């Protein structure tokens, strides 16, 4: 089974399809790795493929891999030729869900490799919808540490901020799940060259723009953003579910983002 949800959204399972949370051990904290310099996109794909195979075989720990790429356009499984407006940078097929995305210096890409057969805090096993909701919440909480209010929008993938009467995307989300192990992940705009996004229609959405922490006046460093991501991760994916809550209620609450 290989599931590639749209730029972030999924075909989730119902609580009746899930193992009881009490019977499924929580996953240990993942390993964090920060790549030095710029990572070529094909090398990142190869690294992720090898890692998820090792995770699935029980030979490696789950991993959060933080990288920066050279200027690159990537095409998801729903991309169309019309979405590539100006191929000024190398173009790669990503294999993840969604449409077109830009990666480049000044943008933090976090590749998340988790075994969804295990529970991650309040996120139930084998629930892609709850997992994607968790990724969104992770980004929102990381941005909150810089007093930036990131928000979800119905029908629009990613995390959005209000900026001078308009709404712009500050983070993209695109996932792939292969035999219940996740790869790909999120990308947050810290201080990329925003003009590079003009070469594509990001995630197929024409009527809204893109922004960054620096454009919003927050001149944080990449190290500070990484620290915010690490702190917010534990709040979302490692916080235990309430002990006194019925297990079905916990699973339903996780789907709603209520725990």
Image: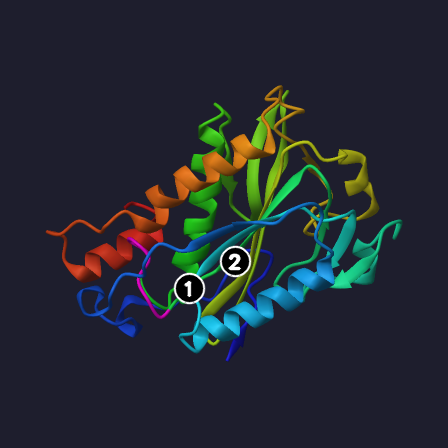
> Is residue 167 inside the magenta stretch?
no
Residue at horizontal 89%, vertical 49%?
88
Q: Position of residue 133 (x, y in %)?
A: 43, 51
Residue beneath disc 2: 9
| Extreme residue toward the left, this view | 244
- The structure's colour scheme is rainbow
- In the drawing, does residue 123 fall left or right of residue 211? left
Label 1 or label 2, whichever lies nearer to me, is 1
- In the drawing, does residue 246 fall left or right of residue 116? left
Residue at horizontal 39%, vertical 66%?
116
* Res. 66 in view: yes
Q: Which label sits on residue 25?
A: none
Q: Which label sits on residue 61?
A: 1
Q: Position of residue 89 (x, y in %)?
A: 85, 51
SS category of the residue bearing label 2: loop
The correct choice, above or below, for 126 with respect to 154 in the image is below
Query: Magenta stretch?
Result: 117-123
| Extreme residue toward the front, this view | 36
């Amino acid at each position: 089974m290989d599931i590639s949800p749209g730029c972030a959204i999924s075909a989730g399972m119902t609580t009746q399809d899930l193992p009881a949370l009490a019977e499924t051990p929580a996953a240990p904290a993942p390993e964090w790795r920060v790549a030095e310099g710029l990572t070529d996109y094909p090398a990142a794909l190869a690294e992720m493929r090898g890692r998820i195979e090792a995770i699935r075989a029980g030979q490696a720990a789950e991993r959060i891999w933080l990288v920066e790429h050279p200027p690159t356009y990537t095409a998801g499984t729903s991309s169309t030729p019309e979405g590539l407006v100006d191929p000024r940078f190398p173009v790669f097929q990503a294999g993840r869900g969604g449409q077109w995305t830009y990666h480049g210096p000044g943008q933090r890409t976090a590749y998340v490799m988790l075994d969804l057969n295990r529970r991650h805090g309040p996120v139930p096993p084998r629930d892609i919808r709850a997992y994607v909701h968790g990724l969104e919440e992770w980004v929102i909480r990381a941005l909150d540490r810089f007093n930036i209010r990131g928000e979800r929008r119905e029908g629009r993938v990613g995390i959005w901020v209000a900026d001078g009467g308009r709404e712009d995307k500050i983070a993209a989300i695109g996932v792939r799940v292969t035999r219940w192990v996740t790869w790909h992940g999120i990308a947050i705009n810290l201080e990329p060259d925003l003009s590079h996004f003009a070469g594509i229609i990001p995630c197929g959405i024409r009527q809204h723009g893109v922004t960054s922490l620096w454009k919003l006046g927050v001149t944080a460093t990449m190290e500070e953003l990484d620290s915010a991501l690490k702190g917010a991760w534990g709040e979302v994916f490692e916080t235990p579910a309430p002990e006194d809550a019925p297990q079905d209620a916990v699973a339903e609450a996780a789907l709603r983002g209520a725990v």
